[in-house]
Image (cartoon, coloured by chain):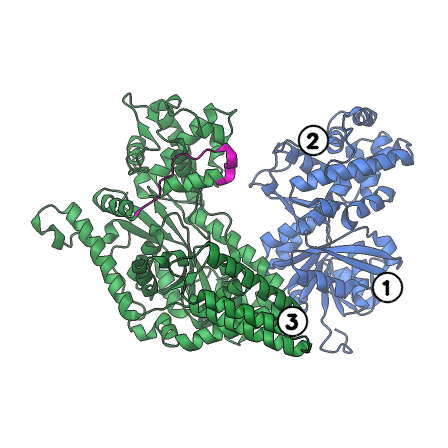
Chain colours: A green, B blue
């Protein structure tokens, strides 16, 4: 029943921090930012076909939206000179427009200089501010803090604070293709794509990267997190670059994509949450945000184009799933999801937001009680979604070695074809979703909530989802024996799927069914005020919150398990 | 390869030298050197020595080979022109020699099934969409080639071989494939349209075969042009709904590969599908008709697959369902016609 988890800390693959790509990038920050700004400028000029009229329109649109944003949605993190900057842009544009004597070429020249100022500003804003001393400090704070908390809770007695009996690895289990990941990280560039259910994920994945001995990854973090100065400090320390979701204009998006692409090409391992934001419904992400993903494909093509070949030029995509019994934000997330999909059919009750007090309370509970987290690392793929072997060679479905470069070749030469790369991005997105489902690990809590929800659904076949969720909770009593039989049925199917490699299961599911159910009931959403599933006094199965039950049930969506009912 | 070719001219590959394959090879040979693949040694021999393929004349620039590796190495662009019954096998034979840089355009109209081992069309009663493969899906499943396209439209080989004017649709998710196909095939007599909805275009070519059987049946019953007009219009509506349910768009069905091909096929009295319908109406049983044919009429297969697929949806497809009962049940063709005439589909067009 015991499964081998990774309990030891790996040696760093690059012991000297000077070799870390992210440190190298930080050293060359100034030149890098300039490069990003120049390249973005060129991309935008290409997109507008070097036509001064189209460029003018884009500039004016950007100006309009930025001014609107400054007025309607200012944040603490915004620089003080924003208003002035956009004022200057406005004046420059007015000046060009009023000078009627200009030729087409000189007008283009004028617009270009405005564009240049904008992309430089954006590039500077996006770029990360990694400092190694800060990284080291942050890492040890997280490490120290977490393990002290853990030992204080589990080891009784006065000296507990100094005990090292338990480490974080007892709480968080890492499984899967970790050796391959470490190995490939020394040879090529890694793009890690984890599922995203909770705000805790960012911290967690940062910690895992460090446990595996990998150098820090760069990742895009929402600018809103930088509003809080303490967060800003940590984020910068972890090599995060800033993504401002308020800015949807062409110039910003192009600059952002250029940054991501160039950083990958520079050899920085990167991390995207491909779902974009946390999964609101609790389902494994099925529709990915493809913007940043496309930069991995672009970087791969650019590497080949510059003549680099072999494994050092290669980019590896590594899917990762993070599995919880419990998602702190579940009530808020599912409420968002239901109000988006159900619109007026779903009435919001009172709003309660996660505060930092709640988060700390959760952390204490998390470490003092027994809820585990597991992280599964998937097999590495090339940017087209083909698995790679230990030497980084791409393999086709039959195991034959193929060259990723061939995908970008047309008539014997590497060509740039945006439309083709868009299709490739779609393909990669689909493959990542497939892999997510394969490496997803079923917990007892997922099993009990899935079974309970499907049983209630079957009893009320005529109701649609929203009516179902509004059923009075006391009507939904499931006799224990029936429930157990249904769990048995679902678990059997899950084991079948596992034998086909379509899903993973946690070792605690191999106990006998009563134990599995109890384990699940004890753990599912254990810190919520209203529990999604529990036993009543008669030993039957009831729910206190249908929406939460739906949320936890969704984790097993996408395996056609509902057809069993 | 002929020595006069400059190194710039790329050799184009054509797999299969049936009537459609020969016609396409000849058209391609007007602009580029062409290499064709034939399974039978004597056919390869005949092409290389006499420049004919089973009696049909071939451009002398066309060379033949019986070796899949040979053609895959020499050609970056391959046209697969093989009958649907053998399609999967041919693709599997070629898979070990295909690489991601290959562009593949196929001209095969049919569906493949992806059932569990041991299951056949006879033993399963329902077929989900995921178990049905269009030809491009077969290529994607069996090979590493991703830049795949298809060729569909009213392209009766006999007329193409005579050099009559015609047009076709090249459908692919990749603009590159469409542009390449247009560059290679377009001529004074041949117009080439592009479409990005490859599934919709493939399905149009497949589903129209059902209607072609019905058209044959009407002719066999001695009915005239009014009836045919009715059938083509109702048939198109049915194709739209079926295609939609299988993942194609409405637009492709009302385009050249849909309505264009449908009209051509319903009037082509020598096609196999038409003959099946015609002889059914004359009172022959399906078994005797099939025994006389050297190859399966694709429409018969399609009717069965679509009937099984309908079981998994709440869609009604009256022409297909009744044709199924005529082909595999005991419904008389006159009764089927009566049934359709009484069928309450009095909304003319409900999909635009």
> What is the span of residues highlighted in magenta in the rendered image?
A340-355
Q: Secondary structure at mark 2?
A: loop
Q: Is residue A44 visible?
A: yes
Which residue in the protein does label 1 denote?
B188
Which residue in the protein does label 3 denote?
A52
Task: Give coordinates of residue A3: x percent, y percent.
Answer: 29, 47
Q: Residues within 10 Å of mark 3 (few under 14, many from 20)?
A: many
Q: Are marks 2 and 3 on the same chain?
A: no
Where, by quadrant of the figure, is residue A234 drawn? bottom left
Task: Tell me how far mark 3 sits from mark 1, CA to CA.
Answer: 39 Å
Q: Chain of mark 2?
A: B
Q: Chain of mark 1?
A: B
Does residue A45 appear left or right of residue B281 in this picture?
left
Which residue in the protein does label 2 denote?
B316
Query: Does the stretch in magenta take in A352?
Result: yes
Q: Secondary structure at mark 1?
A: loop
- Count of marks placed on residues: 3
Q: Residues within 10 Å of mark 1 (few under 14, many from 20)?
A: few
């Amino acid at each position: 029943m015991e499964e081998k988890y990774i309990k030891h800390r790996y040696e760093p693959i690059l012991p000297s921090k000077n070799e870390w790509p992210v440190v190298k990038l930080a050293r060359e920050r100034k030149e890098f930012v300039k490069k990003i700004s120049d390249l973005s400028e060129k991309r935008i000029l290409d997109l507008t076909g070097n036509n001064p009229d189209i460029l003018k329109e884009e500039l004016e649109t950007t100006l309009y939206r930025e001014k609107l944003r400054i007025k309607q949605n200012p944040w603490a993190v915004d620089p003080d000179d924003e208003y002035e900057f956009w004022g200057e842009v406005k004046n420059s544009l007015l000046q060009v427009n009023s000078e009627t004597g200009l030729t087409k070429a000189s007008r283009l020249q004028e617009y270009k200089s405005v564009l240049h100022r904008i992309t430089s500003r954006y590039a500077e804003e996006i770029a990360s501010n990694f400092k190694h001393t800060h990284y080291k400090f942050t890492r040890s704070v997280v490490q120290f803090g977490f393990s002290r908390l853990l030992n204080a809770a589990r080891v009784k007695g006065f000296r507990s604070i100094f005990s090292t009996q338990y480490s974080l690895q007892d709480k968080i289990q890492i499984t899967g293709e970790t050796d391959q990941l470490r190995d490939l990280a020394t040879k090529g560039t890694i793009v890690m794509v984890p599922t995203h259910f909770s705000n805790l994920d960012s911290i967690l994945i940062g910690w895992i990267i460090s446990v595996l001995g990998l150098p820090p990854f760069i990742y895009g973090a929402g600018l809103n997190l930088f509003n809080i100065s303490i967060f800003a400090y940590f984020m910068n320390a972890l090599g995060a670059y800033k993504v401002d979701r308020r800015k949807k204009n062409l110039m910003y998006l192009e600059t952002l994509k250029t940054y991501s692409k160039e950083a990958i090409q520079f050899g920085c391992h990167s991390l995207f949450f491909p779902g974009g934001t946390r999964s609101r419904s609790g389902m494994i992400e099925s529709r990915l945000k493809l913007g940043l993903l496309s930069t991995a494909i672009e970087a791969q093509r650019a590497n080949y184009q510059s003549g680099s070949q072999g494994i050092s030029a290669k980019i590896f995509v590594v899917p990762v799933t993070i599995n919880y019994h419990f998602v702190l934000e579940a009530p808020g997330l599912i409420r968002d999801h239901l109000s988006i999909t159900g619109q007026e059919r779903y009435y919001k009750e009172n709003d309660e937001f996660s505060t930092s007090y709640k988060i700390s309370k959760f952390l204490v509970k998390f470490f003092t009680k027994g809820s585990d987290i597991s992280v599964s690392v998937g097999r590495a793929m090339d940017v087209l979604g083909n698995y790679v072997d230990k030497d980084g060679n791409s393999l086709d479905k039959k195991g034959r070695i193929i060259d990723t470069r061939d995908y970008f070749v047309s008539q014997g030469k590497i060509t740039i074809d945006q439309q083709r790369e868009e299709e490739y991005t779609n393909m990669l997105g689909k493959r990542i979703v497939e892999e997510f489902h394969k490496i997803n690990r079923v917990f007892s809590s997922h099993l009990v909530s899935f079974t309970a929800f499907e049983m209630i659904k079957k009893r009320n076949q005529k109701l649609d989802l929203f009516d179902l969720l509004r059923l009075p909770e006391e009507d939904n009593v499931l006799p224990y024996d029936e429930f157990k039989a249904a769990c048995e049925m679902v678990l059997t199917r899950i084991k079948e799927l596992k034998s086909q490699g379509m899903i993973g299961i946690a070792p605690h599911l191999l106990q006998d069914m009563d134990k599995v159910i109890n384990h699940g009931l004890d753990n599912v959403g254990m810190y919520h005020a209203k529990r999604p599933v529990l036993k009543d006094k008669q030993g039957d199965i009831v729910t206190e919150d249908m929406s939460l039950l739906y949320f936890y049930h969704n984790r097993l969506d996408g395996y056609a398990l509902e057809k069993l009912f | 390869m002929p020595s006069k070719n400059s190194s710039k001219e790329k050799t184009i590959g054509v797999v299969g030298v049936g009537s459609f394959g020969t016609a396409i090879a000849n058209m391609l040979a007007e602009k580029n050197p062409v290499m064709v693949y034939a399974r039978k040694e004597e056919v390869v021999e005949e092409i290389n020595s006499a420049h004919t393929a089973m009696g049909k004349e071939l451009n002398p620039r066309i060379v033949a080979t019986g070796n899949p590796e040979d053609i895959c190495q020499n050609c970056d662009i391959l046209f697969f022109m093989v009958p649907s019954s053998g399609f999967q096998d041919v693709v599997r034979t070629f898979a070990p020699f295909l690489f991601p840089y290959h562009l593949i355009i196929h001209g095969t109209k049919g569906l493949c099934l992806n059932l569990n081992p041991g299951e056949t069309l006879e033993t399963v009663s329902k077929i989900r969409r995921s178990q049905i493969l269009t030809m491009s899906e077969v290529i994607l499943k069996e090979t590493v080639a991703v830049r795949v396209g298809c060729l569909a439209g009213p392209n009766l080989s006999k007329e193409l071989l005579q050099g009559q004017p015609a047009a076709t649709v090249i459908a692919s998710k990749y603009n590159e494939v469409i542009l390449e196909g247009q560059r290679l095939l377009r001529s004074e007599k041949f117009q080439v349209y592009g479409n990005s909805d490859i599934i919709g275009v493939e399905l149009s070519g497949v589903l129209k075969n059902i209607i072609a059987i019905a058209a044959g049946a009407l002719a066999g019953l001695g009915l005239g042009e009014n009836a045919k007009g009715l059938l083509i219009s109702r048939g198109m509506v049915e194709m739209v709904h079926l295609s939609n349910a299988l993942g194609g768009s409405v637009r492709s069905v009302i385009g050249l590969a849909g309505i264009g091909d449908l009209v051509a096929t319903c009037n082509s009295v020598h096609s196999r599908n038409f003959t099946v319908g015609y002889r059914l109406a004359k009172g022959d049983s399906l078994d005797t008709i099939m025994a006389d044919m050297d190859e399966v009429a694709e429409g018969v297969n399609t009717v069965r697959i679509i009937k099984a697929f309908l079981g998994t949806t709440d869609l009604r497809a009256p022409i297909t369902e009744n044709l199924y009962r005529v082909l595999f049940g005991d419904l008389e063709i006159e009764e089927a016609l009566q049934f359709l005439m009484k069928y309450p589909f009095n909304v003319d067009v409900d999909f635009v």
